[in-house]
Amino acid sequence: MTEWIEAHPAPPAPMRMESLDLEGLAVGKHRVAIELADDPAGRPVFAPALVAKGSKPGPVVGLTAAVHGNEINGMPTIHRLFARIPPEELAGTVVGVTIVNLPGYLRFKRQFPDGADLNRIMPGKPDGNESQIYAHRVKTRILDGFDILFDLHTASFGRVNTLYVRADMTHAATANIARAIGAQIIVHNAGADGSVRGTVAALGKPAITIEIGDPQVVDGAKIRASRIGIRDALESLGMLPPDDQQAPATGIECRSSQWLYTDAGGVLEVPLELAQRVEAGDFVARLYDAWGAKIRTYRAPWAGIVVGKSTNPVARAGARIVHLGVVGPP
């Protein structure tokens, strides 16, 4: 071993499972690998997961990360949360699946290798194509074992997000969990969209999505805020006693949100700040042609708040400009 590399003790090998099986686990923390598929060499493809099984009865709360393979802030959020969960004080079980879309993660890609978006084809099919089978096994082998879901995401390439939550705010139990996170913005969204969250919510279970910053980076500030907020949500469920870190007060709630899109191609400038309020008619972006002539000025069609925005100046016709939330109750 070279002098500048410090080796640490090898961690225990993960327990292999065909599907999430919590009954046989002892109180404490466990490393598990849930089999979801086989690769072309016949090797099993596993979803890595952490399990904290409490000493007292309670619900099973699941956290899922990297459903999109390049959205990785959820991984360290889970890691840092689990480091602060004492099983002897925990009522129930917390499961953190750190990489759902392992094939996409290994390719640094949002999509599954066949081009499908796993978060749009749930709950998949047992006898479908490659991505449909994988999605079906995610549901039946992992998601069906949860009573409550926190699905952790980030923005996609070329975009930035506030720290915000998507949730069905007409579902009381879901709304309570969403508000406990302390996010900057909460967007009401029923979730019937082929998503992981929508699949769990369709079973009548509380499920929220937490958007934690930007893709293929580790954003320490948003990870810390998310970790504190999720811990607060677990405390609100009676699963853990309060600790000395508390999320800020509930952020701004929106009854809906929508992206604005360009109607032409060019060089896009979006000078708005995240979480900035705009009024109907306010300037939001400009589009220039390749010679520098201004060809479009875009204005807000309604009053709202900036949930996210594009950071990619290279815009085709139909490119995203800004994600505007409409403030108010659902």
Image (cartoon, helix red, strand yellow):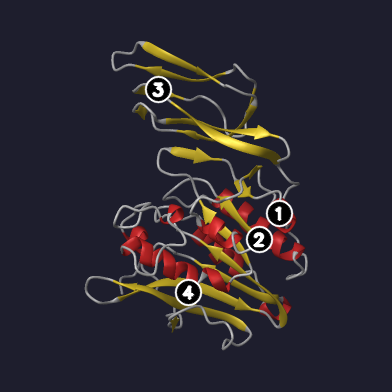
* Among the two numbered marks 1 and 4 on one chain, the one whose residue lies closer to the N terminus: 4
Q: Amino acid at mark 1?
A: His
Between 132 and 68, the residue placed more toward the observer is 132
Residue designated by label 2: 206
* Among the two numbered marks 3 and 4 on one chain, the one whose residue lies closer to the N terminus: 4
Crowd around label 3: few <14 · some 14–19 · many ≥20 (10 Å)? some
As drawn, 305 above or below 330: above
Q: How many marks?
A: 4
As drawn, 52 above or below 218: below
* Among the two numbered marks 1 and 2 on one chain, the one whose residue lies closer to the N terminus: 1
* Quarter of the picture holding the N terminus: bottom left
* Among the two numbered marks 3 and 1 on one chain, the one whose residue lies closer to the N terminus: 1
The answer to whether the residues at label 1 and label 2 have Cβ atoms under 8 Å apart is yes
Q: Amino acid at mark 3?
A: Asp
Mark 3 vs mark 1, foreground winner is 1
The answer to whether the residues at label 3 and label 4 have Cβ atoms under 8 Å apart is no
Crowd around label 4: few <14 · some 14–19 · many ≥20 (10 Å)? some
The answer to whether the residues at label 3 and label 2 have Cβ atoms under 8 Å apart is no
**Label placed on residue 141:** 4
Give the residue drawn at x 45%, y 38%: 159
As drawn, 259 above or below 116: above
Q: Is residue 193 left or right of residue 176?
A: left
Crowd around label 1: few <14 · some 14–19 · many ≥20 (10 Å)? some
